[in-house]
Amino acid sequence: MEMKMDIGLTHIALPVSDIEQSVQFYATYAAMKVVHRRIDAETGVAVVWLSDQTRPFVIVLIQSDSVHPVLSPLAHLGVGCPNREAMDALCERAEQEGVLLQSPKESGYPIGYWAFLRDPDGHTLELSYGQEIGLTVESNAR
């Protein structure tokens, strides 16, 4: 039996200062859950893989004493929301929790409706609605 191998973009790795705090942030704001957890055998460092389970892609969180540099506003992770109402609700929560960096803004096609949040270590997460990335990729598939 042939082993199935991953190809293409599979993950992004982020250093984090508190894995559990970061897991909670991405569960809340990006609908991600832990799909793998371990203590690295060589380094003794905690590692968690998070996925929204919509595609074979994970965010790898790696426990670190120092988190520099960070993904800051222009460099960011992007998550599509199912509708504006869901996005607005998340942004309201983010504002109450003090993690909203940029209030929702409509920028038209192809950018859509978007906002920036700050994760526990200062990495930026973009929430969006209407970017049509999936449709654009499909229409340009070979």
Image: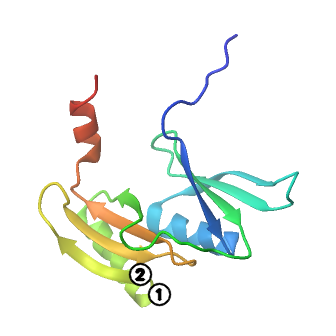
Q: Residue furthest left?
A: 108
Is residue 112 left or right of 55 when viewed as pictured? Answer: left
Q: Are there few (<14), some (14-19), or many (20+) residues within 10 Å of tag 2?
A: many
Residue found 85% across the figure and 58% down from its top: 43
**Residue flagged by tag 2: what amino acid is it?**
Ala
Q: Are marks 1 and 2 in contact (CB under 8 Å)?
A: yes
Q: Quadrant of the C terminus?
A: top left
Report the residue at 52% width, 78% height from top. Answer: 122
Crowdedness near tag 1: few (<14), some (14–19) or many (≥20) residues, C-alpha within 10 Å:
few
Image x and y of residue 23, in percent: 61, 66
The x, y position of residue 88, in whole percent, is 29, 74
Between 12 and 82, the one nearer to me in the picture: 12
Question: What is the CA distance from the residue labelled 1 to the residue labelled 2?
Answer: 5 Å
Q: Which residue is depicted at the point 51% across and 45% down?
A: 53
Dot 2: element: helix
* Disc sitting over residue 97 in the figure: 1
Establish if 35 lies above or below 91: above
In the image: residue 139, left or right of residue 1: left
Residue 36: percent from left, percent from top? 70, 49
- Residue 86, relative to residue 140: is it above or below? below
Q: Which residue is mark 2?
A: 94
Give the residue at x 69% y 62%.
62
* Element assignment for label 1: loop
How is this picture coloured? rainbow
For badge 1, the amino acid type reads Glu
> From the image, which quarter does the N terminus lie in?
top right
* Depth order, front residue of 96/60: 60
Residue 29, by quadrant, is bottom left
Quadrant of residue 134 within the rendered picture: top left
Does 91 sit above or below residue 30? below
Residue 65 shown left or right of residue 99 in the figure: right
Q: Is residue 1 left or right of residue 38?
A: left
